[in-house]
Image (cartoon, helix red, strand yellow):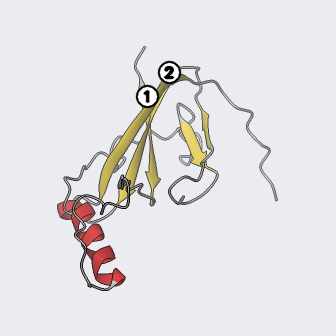
């Protein structure tokens, strides 16, 4: 059985700097530079990391009935973006039932790639979810 992938775009990034006993975090020397300049340097360092083209969905297969859905795998998130430490619910339906993975991407420059893969979750066993009735 082929493993399906569901790409999820995330705007949040978790940057952890362990500072023990009042020490400065690595890469941030004690300076009198304004906080905005130090923050800009963190953003520049993040955006200089290698990016990935995998966030772009290139093999979308729509059903032939209405051309708007892909029942083989569909999903959505409870929020459009999250801050570090916040939770995110991801709802997925697969018809027929099959295994899938979720890839989490952070959007950014990344050398023109547009995103960086943060992690891969799964595989999970998918199942069909009820289709809600079409409203007026």
Q: Position of residue 68 (x, y in %)?
A: 56, 49
Q: Going by the image, does 25 lie left or right of 123?
A: left
Residue annotated with mark 2? 99
User: Relative to residue 19, is residue 32 drawn left or right?
Assistant: left
Above-or-below relation of 25 to 38? above
At a point 80% along the width and 54% down the height, the residue shown is 135
| Nearer to me, 88 or 24 | 24
CB within 8 Å, label 2 to label 1: yes
44 displayed left or right of 3: left
Q: What residue did someone put label 1 on?
A: 4
Q: Quadrant of the C terminus?
A: bottom right
Quarter of the rendering containing residue 75? top right
Question: Secondary structure beneath disc 2?
Answer: strand
Q: Residues within 10 Å of mark 2 (few under 14, many from 20)?
A: some
Measured along the vertical axis of the image, is residue 12 above or below residue 119? below
Q: How many marks?
A: 2
Which quadrant: the N terminus? top left
Residue 65 lies in quadrant: top right
- Nearest the viewer among 65 and 100 is 100
Residue that appears at 50% across and 56% down = 84
Determine the secondary structure under disc 1: strand
- Give residue 27's position: percent from left, percent from top: 21, 62
Q: Earlier in the sequence, mark 2 or mark 1?
A: 1
Instruction: Give the residue drawn at x 38%, y 54%.
Output: 16
């Amino acid at each position: 059985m082929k493993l399906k992938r569901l790409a999820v775009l995330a705007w949040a990034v978790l940057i952890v700097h362990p500072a023990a006993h009042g020490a400065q975090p690595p890469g941030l020397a004690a300076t009198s530079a304004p906080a905005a300049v130090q923050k800009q340097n963190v953003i520049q360092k993040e955006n200089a990391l290698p990016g990935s083209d995998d966030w772009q969905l290139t093999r979308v297969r729509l059903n032939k009935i209405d051309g708007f859905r892909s029942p083989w795998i569909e999903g959505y998130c409870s929020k459009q973006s999250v801050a570090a430490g916040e939770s995110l619910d991801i709802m997925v339906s697969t018809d027929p039932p099959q295994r899938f993975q979720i890839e989490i991407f952070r959007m950014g420059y990344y050398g023109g790639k547009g995103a960086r893969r943060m992690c891969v979750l799964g595989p999970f066993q998918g199942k069909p979810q009820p289709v809600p009735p079409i409203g007026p």
